Image: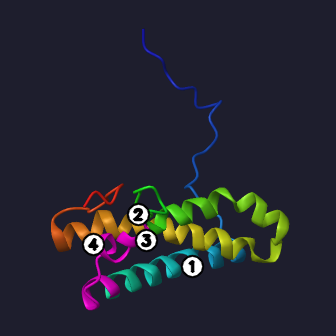
Amino acid sequence: MTLQANSDNMAPMSPPTSAPVPQARLRWILMAVGLTLLFETLTLVLRVGGGLESRVATAGLAAFTFGLRIHHGYLGLAMLLAFPLARRWAPAHADRWSATGLALVLSDALHHFGALWVLNGSPGFDLTYGC
């Protein structure tokens, strides 16, 4: 049994179109991308240019974090989770808040699963100080 398409019931095919990105959305995307690149650049400058390794430079925080490493992506994730509060309490700054939070998450991911893998051959994503 074969099924045949009935051309009488089919609408003519039109090429898919994409709606233009609203100006506010485009500004938010550009802000998030720009901040991501800024944060990652600063991280690499400190890592490569300054010779800092966060595991060593922040080891003194281990007592305050119960031995858990705090990545800047965690701060960004907390900012994204707090976005509904930011939108309610400071609506004029909510877009900047969410773009900064996303940029911190993306920068941390880019740093560990991109830059560090290229520089060290390992993502170096340690959950604890475990020296």
Category of crowding for the residue at label 1, using alpha-carbon neighbours closer than 10 angstroms: few (below 14), some (14–19), many (at least 20): few
Side (left or right) of 123 relative to 25: left
Residue type highlighted by circle 1: Leu
Number of the front mark, 2 or 3 = 2
Task: Specify the quadrant that holds the N terminus.
Answer: top left
Side (left or right) of 44 relative to 98: left
Tell me the residue that label 1 is attached to: 30
Q: Determine the image quadrant of residue 51.
A: bottom left
Q: Position of residue 13 (x, y in %)?
A: 57, 47
Tell me the residue that label 2 is attached to: 62
* C-alpha distance separating marks 2 and 3: 22 Å
Structure colour scheme:
rainbow
Residue depicted at x 31% and y 58%: 126
Residue depicted at x 45% and y 63%: 70
Residue type highlighted by circle 4: Ala
Q: Which residues are magenta?
A: 46-62
Q: Which mark is residue 115?
A: 4
Q: Position of residue 10 (x, y in %)?
A: 62, 34
Q: Earlier in the sequence, mark 1 or mark 3?
A: 1
The stretch drawn in magenta includes residue 94: no
Question: Which SS class for mark 3?
Answer: helix
* C-alpha distance separating marks 1 and 4: 22 Å
Number of the front mark, 1 or 3 = 3
Number of the front mark, 2 or 4 = 2
Q: Earlier in the sequence, mark 2 or mark 3?
A: 2
Q: Nearer the viewer, residue 80 or 11?
A: 80
Q: Earlier in the sequence, mark 2 or mark 4?
A: 2
Q: Position of residue 15 (x, y in %)?
A: 55, 55
Tell me the residue that label 3 is attached to: 107
Q: Which mark is residue 65?
A: none
Residue type highlighted by circle 3: Ser
